[in-house]
Structures are given as C-alpha cells and as structure tokens.
Amino acid sequence: MSLTDDISLLQQIPVFADFADDHLRLLAFSAESLDYRSGSTLFDEGERADGGLVVAEGAVSLLKRGPDGFDEVDKATVGTLLGETALLVDTKRPCRAVAVGGVRVIRIRRALFKRMVQEYPELAQRLFNKQAQRFQTTVSALRPIGERIAELQRIAGDKLD
C-alpha cells in the first residue's frame, strides 16, 4: 500500500477522522508498517501497550485466556484501531491478537501521537471534545441501568425490613 492509501485508511478511523490532511500525512509517514504471517502473535494479553495498531490488510483474531486456553472474543478487520487507549496512556493489552492469514498493520506509537497532539493544539482540543462526547454518551446509556439497580436495592431493602 502507498502513503496515500494509508492516509485514506487512517481518515476512516473515528479518532483520526477530524485530522487535517497534513496531520494524517505526517502521522502515516511517521508510523511504522509491520507485516505478520498467518498465526503470528501481534501482541499478547497483559503485555505493555506502547501505542495503537491499525489493521491495514487482513484480519486479526482477538483472544482471551480462559480455563481451557484461549477463546476468540472478536475479530478485527481492515480499518480497525487496536489499542486506542494506548495512544493516550500507559496500559496493558486486554487480549492476545493473532494474524488470520497475512496481516499488515500501521503501528502508531504513543510518543508519536502525543508529540502530534502537543505540536498541534487544535488536534488536542478536537480529541478532548470527541472523548468527552463519548463519555457523555456512555453515562447516558448507563443511567437507566443505575436507576434500575437502585430500584432493585430499594425493593430488596423493603423486603428485609
């Protein structure tokens, strides 16, 4: 794939969707392109995450450790960003990622992403606004669940009295 293809792919990912073309070009140019053979492990559960991986070609099986080994919990396809949180903060990988067939990823290290956000404050503001909106949406979605739990606790408390 070319730099232009990588830029187009990055533009489709929600966290990068508001980036200007020049910012996307810089990000794509500065990121690493990595190839994996079928069955190769991209990262393992519990491993330190130093950034995000964008699936550029192929598919990645996401596996969680269970009592009898690893079980597939999801499959990441082209255009998926693995490790969005790791772009912003030090964290650990929540699962194992294994290449299904040949896979190419664009690796964006946290240091690169942070440097871009520091050098372009408008990116930081857009990212902050987008994350704040996501949190507000999550809180709104959880509010009815919290109300229901409170109601059940009240009912249970009434029965105990």
Image (tube, grey):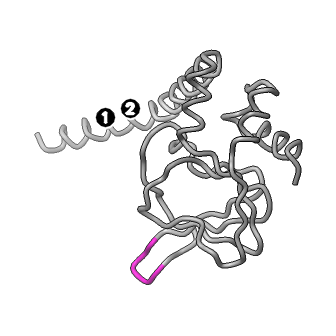
Amino acid at pointer 2: Glu
Measuring from the top left, give residue 150's x and y in whole percent: 31, 34
Task: Give the quadrant of residue 31.
Answer: top right
Measuring from the top left, give residue 54's x and y in whole percent: 69, 51
Q: Residues within 10 Å of mark 2 (few under 14, many from 20)?
A: few
Q: Residues within 10 Å of mark 1 (few under 14, many from 20)?
A: few
- The secondary structure type at the circle numbered 2 is helix
Residue drawn at 77 percent across, 72 percent down = 102
Which residue range is magenta in the image? 65-69
Amino acid at pointer 1: Ala
Measuring from the top left, give residue 109's x and y in whole percent: 58, 45
Task: Give the quadrant of residue 127.
Answer: top right
Q: Are marks 1 and 2 in contact (CB under 8 Å)?
A: yes
Give the numbered dot on residue 147: 2
Q: Which residue is mark 1?
A: 150
The answer to whether 69 appears left or right of 63 in the picture is left
